[in-house]
Amino acid sequence: MKYKDKKSERGKVKEIVEDEETIRLKENIYVVFVECESPGNVGFLARTMGNFGLNKLVLINPCTLKEEAYYQATHARDTVENAMIYDTVGEFVKDKKIDFIIGSTGAPGGSYNISRIPLKPEELAKSMNYNDKIAILFGREGNGLTNAEVDMCDLIVSIPTDPSYPIMNISHAAAIILYEIFKNRNEFPVQGLEESTAIEKEYLIKDMEELIDNLNIPEHKKKNGLKVFKNIVNRAFITGREAHTLIGILRRLNLKIKHGDEY
């Protein structure tokens, strides 16, 4: 996916070139909704997929897709229109030659239910091979995946939620899982968010040191003040633009102190 430079209300968009691994991962992921009961949830799921650049939606024995599904999908309407429909998970897996099946569940098992021992979403992301054809299964709104469907899966993923209300809406669960998969692969498509370089931070600290040296305070307070500023700079995420802005202000202050009203 590429973003061309252009002005918008949210800033200047920059060109982003995805690495081959990310492109292939997006091409190889199928999001599978098993026996959906609400057309609206199909739309919400398609919209969530679109947020992460996915468009291969598979519906297993779905309900009738009414206008609500397309309406809730908003800009991912095409994903709903092009959804692949199968009678069973097995039929889909065989037809698309799926290599790796991931099942999602809000009812994880323990040592006595080995099939349902889950990974957390962040652990799942580390276990995926971008060269595999991957299916991520989301179960029925009411009953989730059956034990037979779970047994088909190579991995189970579950989101740690409060035990008093553990089952999440499918689009919310999908958003968390997909976020963990892509969080280290996608960038903000806006210029100016790159972290400042070591040299930029060095100039920033040097200008602050000069400013502090011009103050009429004891030497130990100057030393402590500079140390605190260094800690803040090194601990904080300061963008290159922010660093340059601060450097400009500090230099103007230093000139003001040295030359008075001329600056």
Image (cartoon, helix red, strand yellow):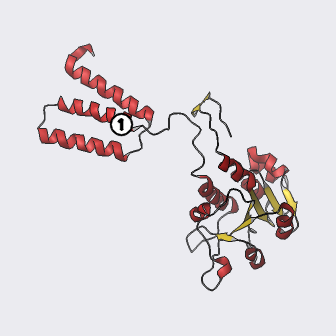
Question: Does any portion of residue 61 appear in the rendered image?
Answer: no
Crowding near pointer 1: few (<14 within 10 Å), some, many (20+)? many
> Seen in the image, is 10 located left or right of residue 78?
left
Q: Residue at x 74, y 55 (%)?
A: 28
Residue at x 41%, y 37% (from the top left corner)? 197
> 204 or 51: nearer the eye?
204
Residue reaching furthest to the left: 218
At 85% from the left edge and 55% from the top edge, which residue is drawn? 66
- Where's the C terminus, which quadrant? top left
Coordinates of residue 233 in the picture (x, y in percent):
34, 42
Say which quadrant the N terminus sits in: top right
Residue located at (60% from left, 81% from top): 110
Query: Residue 71 at x, y = what percent?
Result: 78, 48
Nearer to the camera, 74 or 224: 224
Query: What amino acid type should be assigned to the residue bearing mark 1?
Result: Lys
* Residue 107 locus on image (x, y percent): 65, 75
Q: Which residue is mark 1?
A: 201
